Every structure is written in structure tokens, then in C-alpha cells.
Image: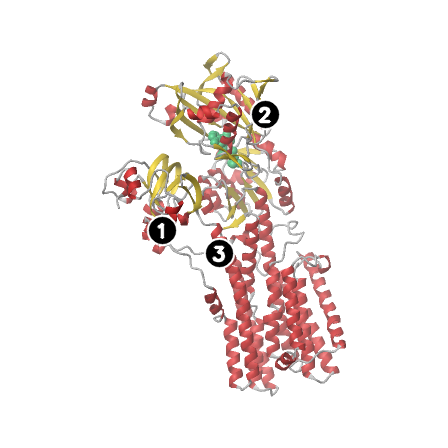
Amino acid sequence: MNWHSMTADEVLSKLDSNHEGISSKQAKERLSQQGPNQLESPTKPSPLRIFIGKFKDYMVLVLIFAAIISFIAGETTNAYVILGIVVLVAIIGFVQEYKAEKAMEALREMVAPEADVIRDGRLSTIPAAELVFGDVIFLEAGDKVPADGRILEESSLQVIESSLTGESQAVEKMALPLPERLALADRKNMVFMGTIISQGNCRAVVTATGRGTELGMISGLMKQEQAEPPLKIKLQQLAKRQAILVLVISAAVFILMFSRGLPVVDALIASIALAVAGIPEALPFIVTLALAFGTQAMAKKNAIIRRLPEVETLGSTTVICTDKTGTLTTGEMTLREIRTYRKIDVTGAGYDPSGQFISNGSRLDPAERDLARILKIGVHANNSAMERGNDGWRVVGDPTEGALIVAAKKAGILDRIKESNNRLVEFPFDSERMRMTTVDEAGGEGYTVSMKGAPEVVLSHCTKIMRPNGTRPISDQDKRSILAEADQMAENALRVLALAWKPISINDLAEADSIDSMESGLIFAGLTGMMDPPRKEVPEAIRISKMAGIRTVMITGDHRLTARAIGKELGIGNGEVIEGAELDRMSAEDLCEHIDEVSVFARVTAEHKVRIVEALKAKGHIVAMTGDGVNDAPALTAADIGVAMGRTGTEVTKEASDVVIADDNFATIVSAIEEGRRIFDNIRKGTSYLLSVSFAELATIFFALALGFPLPLLAAQILWINVVAEEFPAIGLALEPSHSDIMKRKPRDPREPMPSRTLMIYTLGTAAAIVAGTLGLYITTLQSNADVSYARTVAFVGLGFFTVYNAYSSRSLQESVFSMDPWGNKTLLMGIGLSILAILAVVYIPFMQFIFETRPLTIESWALILATGLLVLLAAEIMKKLLSKWR
Ligand code: ATP
């Protein structure tokens, strides 16, 4: 269909739609006919697939092999035990993976793209996957086009279509029909899925979705792969290295048993069981589980992880570079002060439109010339609107503009200005231009140009100034004193905008051939000062980050003095500020030299952000950088952690980010870092725990045989501890809540190996204590009681209990078990409870006694086990003390 050669109305009628879009009912019908607006349906592994997948695991295959050997050798009981254990392994593995997959799915849904669409005549935001043909969508700078569409109307629209056409320059778009035979790149009245709006805005009607779009037709080749977390890869390698060690020891055990004249099959099965036990198979899982649960917990706290591997980096952050407006501050702006040729105070709070204008102690009539002009410019050069919600008044759109609308409402003139106004042209605001200009046809007044923006920028476009008795040319002295006034306001932490205007005749309008002629020769009307109070949770978050060795750097487009005042209030930096213009004059080396002394950057643009990130990285920092604007994407990509704002952020910034902060709040970034540290900590704990148990099992068997004693644990017993006693608490460890010292430690060096040297020493130390305890129990019992099965039971219970205890103690690798909150991790307690029950079941349920060849224990043996347990406990405590000394 040649949508581009039809008029907008023809397209709409062909698609059975109109300028107000379609109804939700029509949308539902169309969605069920054409399917979701997705390039490919994401592959979700079905629960059955996950379960069957478990039988392909290395461990399960080895166990099945062991079962077959048992069958062949006629040891059917043993074979059934092993098969039973295979099923258990598969079930536990399935539960772990299924839970992780569910959490991941929830995460994927959270980061799914959205679209602004007009349905039932109202603008609403829906998941982009639900778009159908005929939907009228609204697109603006920073949006990623969610489907193909024909433009109905546009304002200064420019689109980057490089993903489709290879052309990196932005293309100017239009709404008029075009000739029929045109290449894709020349269809300037169409927007295409996956391209990016770089400037302006438009309404478009959706002409194709999903695979029917231009992108859909070529997208077979483009698959998005989620990289594996580097940590997971490191741990997989660790498990492989461990496998070699295990093979050597298992072979040694086999030879030892064989040389003692034990049956080959028994020796083979025992060494296979050992091989299974010795490999910490659950390791990569612990990573997935800790990441999955951790990111879910983060999402609950409003931080949504887009790239999983970066969670590791998050915990190592040393600098957070943050925007000011809306992130450190509430972004709820209230106009406080107006300065024309006199000072006018504005009363009232928030967006509630009640308040007064006071000058020299008396109330002003809003119709007074200077005030009325300021308010009028503020409403003209404005794209925001006020709405009354259930919980009071709200502003839709930019809060800076909202403050001006609210002020006009306070004066009671908002509706009148809006009704009589007809906007002809808009030159939109962006952080580079630092101004917004409109041309309007205002009832009774003819045509006017209205500009608002940063004072120095607006003043540079003014040639006249309003005075009480008319206008006169503006002098340099005037400009200097206005800027001094703006500084004074900024020092009081006010956000200052200047407003200017000029009347323009219809002839001038027709002849004006560029933005420049429209934006020149303006009359300066006055300054407005807005209050944007800091968020109340921010000072505490900054204090916590300081303690955690993380520096906060404020990067703002706002005025240097406003930035400094807010910085002072929040405890950021030492009062020194670098401005964008100064940055331009600095070389990369200069910047690097100063970067550690300056924590506030003002009047900066997106390009400066990239330079700041680079300088910080050159100094060895791990940098998290926030962004919301369309131009912020390069800075977010350059940073180690790109943080996009969920509310004010554009789709493009979100796509370039690693983390999306749903509430735009700085404090959320700090709590995400804390969560990142917790996740990493839990992975360390899980690794240490699983490795120490594996080492302990290997060493116990090996040393017992080497010292000439009979096999201390039977194959089934080893497997039972490995599969049941060990695995349940591992899930709990992945969920351990953060301990009080987590934000008191310095950031972790991301180059540190995993496991680190200290962690390895701790792990081997605890393993040694467990081995000594288990062997000690086994040998003492053997010597006092001739029954090997009894001694094995003591060793089995001892090893099981020490393992369980080790899980509990691993909750913190720094803190003593006595200072931890005993109820702090209920899942772990449940896991420990299950493990203990499983161990007791083997010892006391008659039919299990038969299978596992165990005997019920006497009180004396229990006392011995518990007393040895105390020694193991003591050893772990000493290791913790030593470890904290070494770090
Ligand atoms: P931050 O970068 O911390 O979010 P910011 O919002 O002040 O701070 P920008 O949005 O880049 O940064 O704004 C830069 C300057 O442009 C502001 O200080 C203000 O003077 C001016 N400005 C901001 N919003 C508007 C707007 N909607 N219309 C006109 N001028 C604006």
C-alpha cells in the first residue's frame, strides 16, 4: 500500500480511523486479528522444557550412569536410591530455574517499550506491543518509533533513520502527500518502526505493525541476545577447574578402595558419588538465583535492571553523576518571584492554583501591564497543561512550564489567554538551545513572538526592555544588572528563566525566512524565579554514599549559582563549580586533573556529560551516569552504568541505559547500588559455602581411606548430603538480606578475581574445620564401637550438621553469627529446617535406615556431634576475624 502518496484523510479512511484514533473495542478486535506489534514472540521455556532440560545436566547424567552400573552389578537398592536422587536433583534444579525464569520474565515485561496513543479520544500510554493499524500515536523527541505510520501533522519533526536506511543524518519530515514511486528514505511523510525522533513532535496513524513493518521485513537477522553475566562465566570456569581436581581425587579413591580388595562396583559407585559431590554444580545457579531475586527486589524499590551483567558493576560504583532537576530535587516547581522593573512575590505552594502577587507589601492586580505580559509569554511559550486529579492539581508536561501555567491560573487569566490563542509556529526547547520560542496569533493583539529560557541566552536576543512607561533600547548596563539580579535569585536556589517578546506584523511573519529573524530584536519582559525543593530523602542518600566510598557529582543544565546553592544544601562538593563554557576551554588532560576536586557542573549539555564520564573513567572510577534527554544516550553508553529516568526519560535514553529508575529519584540509585552490593555478596557467600562443602566431602573420604580406615560415607549418603542437605540452604543464601555494614565498606574493585584470594582462604579454612570434625567423629566412634555402619552414621550426621551450620554462618563473611539477627532470613531457616529433617529421616525412619544403611544414634553420640559442632563454629568465627583483618 502506498500510504505516502495519499492524503492524511485518505489514509485515515482506508484504515477506518480518524484524527481522534480508534476505540478500545476496535483496537481489541484488530489486535486479535493481526497479533501483537512485536518482531518476534519472545521464547519462553515451558515448565516441561525446563524440567526435561534438567536431565541433560552433567551431574544427572553421571548419576544415571552410576544407577546403570548398580543395576548391572545387581545392587538394585542402590540403583533405586540413585534414581530417586536423580529425580530430586531434577526437581530442585527445576524449582530454582523456574523461579529464576519467572523473575526474569517479570523483569522483561517491566522494560517493554510503551507508546502514547489516542484511544476513545483520549491520550494514553500503552505497551507498544498492543498497537494496531489505525491507532493514532503521538511521538516526540527521544521516542523510538513503535510501528510504521503515516504522519498526520508535525512540528519541526526530524527523525534518525540510520537503523533502516543507513543514513546517519536526521531526516526532516512532513505531512503532505508525495509522489508514488519513492524509495524508503524519501518517504518523508512516513515514520518507521525502530527509528528515532531526534527533534520536534508529530501525530501519526499506524499503517503497519510487527512483522508487517519495514523493519519487520528485514529483521529476521537481528536477534537480541542477552549476554551472560561475566560472573556466571567465571564461576562456570571455576566449576570446570574443580571438576579436574575432583576427577583426580575420585580416581585416587577408586584405586585406594580397589587396592584394599573392595568390590570394583562399590569402588566405582563411591568414586562416582564423590565426583558428583565434589563439583559445586549449583554454583552458576546461585548466580542466576541471586541475580533474579535481587533484581526483583530492586524493581520493588523502583530500580529496573535492563542489562543483567551490569548488576555486578553496580556494586562497584565509585561515582554517581546525577542530574539535578527532578532527580536531586522534586521537580515540582513553584513560581516564587517575578522581576520586571519591580520585584513581585508570588504566594502559594505546589501546583495548587491559589495564591497572590505581592509587590511592596500590597497585592497586585494581575492585569497590571508588566505582570500581565510576563504571564502571557509564560502561557504562549508553553506546552504543559494543568489537570485536577483525585489527589489535587497535577501538571502534564514539563514542570518548569507547569509552574508558569499555574501562576497564570492563580492570576485567573489562564483560560482566557488559552482560548483566544492560536499557535502558528514553535521552536521547541532543548538543553542545547536553552530556550523555547513560539509565534502566536493572540486575540485582539495580532501576532506575537514569545521566548522563554536561560537569562543569558534570552538577553542575547533582546534589543529592547520594558519600562513602566513603555519600552526603550536595552543597554549593556541593563543586561549586566539583569544578570546580577538573576544571580541573586539563583543564589537563593531559585531556578531562573527570562521572558521576552515582540509584536510581529503579518508581513514580517511572511517574510521571516529563518528562526534567527524570528528570535531577534525581542523586548525583555522580566525574570521568573522558581523553587524546586530538594527531595527530602536525598541528603540521607548522599550521606550513605559518602560512607560507602561513593562520590556524588551533580551535572545540571541549570545556572551555576542555583547549582551551587542546591549542592550546598545537599552536601555535594565544596562550593566549586565548573560551567559548560569553561569545560569547552579545558583539554581532556586539564579536566582529568581537576575532576577529583569538582563535584558540581552547571550549564552543561549532553556532550559535556560524555567528557566528564571519560575524565572520571580515566582516573579509574566506576561511573554511574543519569540521563533523560534525547541527547543523553552517548553519555549513558560511555558510563559504566547508564541510569535512565523512568518518568521523564525518553525511550532512547532508556534503551541506552543499564538501569531505569522508575521514580526519577536519586535515593533510588543509591539503594540500587546497595542492592547490587548485596547481590554480589550473596554470590560470594553461596560460592564459599558450596565450595567448602565440596572440598569437605572430597577431603573426608580421601583422608579416611589414605589413613587406612574404611569408607566413611556410602555413595547414597554422600549424594543425600550433596543433593538435599546442601541445596535447600543454598537457595536461602541467595536471598540473604543486606547486613548493616554493606554501605560502610569501600566499593569492591571489579578486577578482583572471583573467588578472591581471601575468600578462597576462608573457604578452605572452614572446609578444613568440617573435615577435621567429621573425621574426628568417625575415627573416635570407630575406635569405641566396632560397627562401621554406626560410625558412618555418626560421620554422616556430623557432616550434614556442619554443612547446615556452615550455611547459617555464611550469611555474613564478616559478621559473627552471634551478632546477626537470627530471624533475618526466613527462607534460609526453612532450608536449614528441611535439611535437618532430611538428615534425621535417614537416621530414624526404618525404611530409610535400610536403604542408607544407618543406625539410630545414642545420646552420647549426639553429645559428641554437638560438641564437635562447637569446635567447627569456633573455627569459622576465627576465620571471619582473620579475614576481616586481611581485607
Ligand atoms: P538538569 O540537567 O539537572 O535536569 P535542567 O533541567 O536545568 O537541569 P536543562 O533542562 O538542560 O537542565 O535546562 C537548561 C536551562 O534551560 C535551564 O536552566 C533553564 O534556564 C532553561 N530551561 C529549562 N527548561 C526550559 C523550558 N521548558 N523552556 C525554556 N527554557 C527552559
> How packed is label 1: few (under 14 Cα within 10 Å), some, or many (20 or more)?
many
Q: In the rendered structure, which amino acid carries the disc numbered 2? A: Thr
> Residue 845 occupies which quadrant of the picture?
bottom right
- Give me the residue at 47% from left, 52% from top: 109
> In terms of sequence position, does the residue under pointer 2 or pointer 1 come before the other?
1
> Residue 752 occupies which quadrant of the picture?
bottom right
Q: In the rendered structure, which amino acid carries the disc numbered 3? A: Glu
Residue 116 in view: yes
> How packed is label 2: few (under 14 Cα within 10 Å), some, or many (20 or more)?
some
Q: CA distance from mark 2 to mark 3?
A: 49 Å
Tell me the element at label 3.
helix
Q: Return the mark for residue 618.
A: none
Residue 103, compared with residue 383, is above or below; it is below
Tell me the element at label 2.
loop
Q: CA distance from mark 2 to mark 1?
A: 52 Å
Residue that badge 3 annotates: 105
Residue 557 in view: no
- Give me the residue at 45% from left, 15% from top: 473
> In terms of sequence position, does the residue under pointer 1 or pointer 3 come before the other?
3
In the shown orientation, is residue 129 left or right of residue 233? left
Residue 773, compared with residue 14, is above or below; it is below
Tell me the element at label 1.
helix
**Residue 120 vs residue 147, the one in the foreground:** 120
> In terms of sequence position, does the residue under pointer 2 or pointer 3 come before the other?
3
x and y, in percent, of residue 119 in the image: 40, 42
Q: CA distance from mark 1 to mark 3?
A: 20 Å
Disc 2: residue Cβ within 8 A of ligand 1's nearest atom: no
Residue that badge 1 annotates: 210
Residue that badge 2 annotates: 347
x and y, in percent, of residue 42 in the image: 42, 57
**Residue 508 vs residue 19, the one in the foreground:** 19
Q: Residue furthest top?
A: 469
